[in-house]
Image (cartoon, helix red, strand yellow):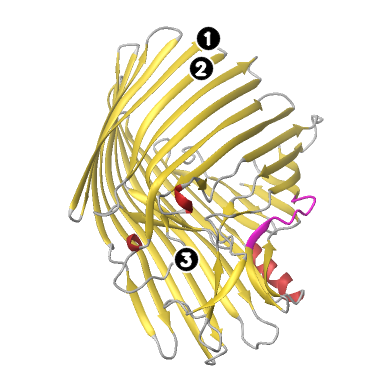
Amino acid sequence: EGNRKKYSGDIHVSPVAGSVVVEGPLKKDKASFLISGRRTWLDGLLWTGQKIAGSDFSTGYNFYDLNAKVNWEINPYNRLYISMYNSRDSRFATWKAKDSKHSDRFRFYWGNLSVSGRWNHLFSPTFFSNITLYYSQFNNSQIMTVYNESVSQREQSKTNSRLRDWTLKTDSEIAIGEKHRTRFGTVCSIKYYAPEMSYIGSVNLNENVRDTTTGNVYSLETYLEDHWQLNDHWSVDAGVRFSLLAVPHARYYSLQPRLSISYRIGESVLFKTSWARMQQAQHLLTSNSMGMNTDLWVPVTRRVAPASSDLFSIGCFYAFANTWNFSIEGYFHQMDHVVRYQDGILFLKTKDRSWQDYVDMGKGRAYGVEVMAKKTTGALTGWVSYSWSKSERRFDHVNNGEWFPFEYDRRHKLNVTTNYTLPIKEKCKFNKSFSINFTLATGNYISIGKQFYHAAPMPESFQTDADNTQYREYIERPNNFRMPAYHHLDISYALDNRKGKGSSWVFGIYNLYARKNPSIIYHKQTREGVTIRSWSLLPFVPSVTWSYHF
C-alpha cells in the first residue's frame, strides 16, 4: 500500500529484465503511494543470438507490467484505495525457407488493463463494508504476414479479441457475537465482448470480419455467507449465491450453494471438506495446435448456455513445532456445458458467422491430489510440493463420445524450493544465502497431424501450392500428442545488504543442465516430406542481478 512514513525504492537490473519500485507518503501517516514496473529484454538477446547462428527460424518473448496504488485514511472510519494495473506480453517468430528471399512473420501479444477504486467504511467495531468500482480490459491479437511465392505477393491476416468489464460491487461483514461472522454483498457488471475481429489483406483482397456475438452482457449477483464456530473443534461456513445473467433474447438464473466444514484437533491438526456449486458467465475456447496455446474468452449466448460445475475437496493440514507445515488435499471437479472448437477450425472464420457456429458443447471432469511439506524457520527453509491430477473432456460428436484429455492435463507436477542462510560475522556487510529450485511437470497435450493430404484451400488460408491446393493434416483424435516433460534446475547465490540502503547482488543460473524444453512445435517441409520440429527457449541462462535500495 506504500510507505506512509518516508520515501524509499528499489532498482533491480539483470541481463534478463529490469524493475523499479518507488513508494512514499502523500500526507504523512495519512496517505501514501506505490509505483512499480518491470520489463524483460531477453527477446533482443535471443533474436541477436539466433541471427548470429544463422538460423532460418527465430523466436522471442517479452513482457512488461506496471502497478500504481494510492491509499488515503480519511478518518478512523473511512479509507479510500485507488489502484491501476497494466501489462502486455508479446511473442514473435520469423522463419524463411532456404530457397526463398522473403521471410514470414508471426506476432502474438496479449495484455490487461485494470483500474479500480475502493471505499472502506467502518460502521462499528463489528460491522464494516467495501464498495468497489472497477474497469478492466483484456486484449489478444495475432498478426501473421507471409509471402505467397505462387502469386509473388505479401499477404497478411490479423485476429483481435477483446473483453471489457465495468463492475460495481459491495462486500460487507458483520460479527454476530463471538461465534458468528456473516458476509453479504452484491455484484453488478456490464461486460463487452468482441471475441473475433479479423482482417485478411493482400493485393487482390481486403476483408474485415466481425463476430456476430459482439456486444454487451449484463449480470447481477447477490450472496450471503455465514461462518459459525460451533465449539473449539468444529466450524462451518455455509452460503448461497444467486445469479441473473441477461444476454440478447435470453435470461439465465442460477442458485449456487456452498458448504465448508472444518474439524480442528488442538492447534496443530485441521481436517477440512467443502463443496461448491458454481456458474460461469463466459467460456474459454482453447486452440492448442502445434504447441501454440491461444485462449479466447467468449460470452454466454441464447444458443450457448453458461458453464456450471460442482467442486468437492477434502484435506488435512498439520503444523509441527511452529517449524513444519504438512498438507494433503484431494479434489473432484465436475463441469457441464463446456465448449471446444470443432476439429479443423481456425481462428479466422467465415463472414457473418461467429465462434458459436463452430463449437461443440459437452462435459468435463478433473480430479487429483496435492501434497506439500514446508519448513518456515531455521537456516534451511523451503518446501516440496507434488500433485497428481487428471483433466478430461467428453462431447457426443467427438472421439466417438468417449473421454479424452484436456489441453492443460498435466499428470505429475513436482516443485522443490530450498534456501540456506549462511552463518555470518557481525561485521559482515551482507546476509548470504544459497537457493536451489527444481521444477518438473508432465507435458501438456496438443493436437498434431501425423499424416497429410492435399485438399482445396480453406477460405481464410493463404498457404497454398502453385496448383491452388493445400496441405491438410489428419488428426485421429483430439489432443493426440503429449509434449515432452518440462523440467529445469535453477541455482542462485544472494548477497543481501544488511543496512537499510545500498546495493545487493544475486548470482544465478537458470536451467543449470540446459534442458531443451520445447516451446513451439511446428511442421517443416524437407526432402523426406513433412516432419515435426520443436523449438526451445532459455536453454541455459546465467545472470547477475544488481539491486539498489534507497
For discs 1 and 3, the disc positioned in front in the rendered view: 3
Looking at the image, residue 367 sits to the left or right of residue 42; the answer is left
Please tell me whether mark 3 sits on a helix, a strand or a loop: loop
Q: Distance from label 2 to label 1 (Cα)? A: 8 Å
Residue type, numbered disc 2: Phe
Q: Nearer the viewer's eye, disc 2 or disc 1?
A: 2
Q: Find residue 60 and report its horizontal and vertical position in percent.
A: 63, 66
Task: Give the residue number, with chain letter if any, for mark 3.
Answer: 344
Which secondary structure, mark 1?
Answer: strand
Please, is residue 379 above or below residue 188 in the view?
A: above
Report the Cα–Cα distance between label 2 and label 3: 47 Å
Q: CA distance from mark 1 to mark 3?
A: 55 Å
Image quarter of the N terminus = top left
Q: Are marks 1 and 3 in contact (CB under 8 Å)?
A: no
Q: Quadrant of residue 40?
A: bottom right
Q: Are marks 2 and 1 in contact (CB under 8 Å)?
A: yes
Reply above or below: 237 against 283. Answer: above
Magenta highlight: main SS: loop
Query: Residue 502 at x, y = what percent?
Result: 68, 45
* Residue, disc 2: 271
Please name the amino acid that badge 1 sits on: Ile
Mark 1 / mark 3, whichever is N-terminal: 1
Magenta stretch bounds? 510-520
**Residue at which label 1 appears:** 265
Q: Residue furthest bottom?
A: 152
Residue 211 seen in this snapshot: yes
Per the image, is 519 magenta? yes
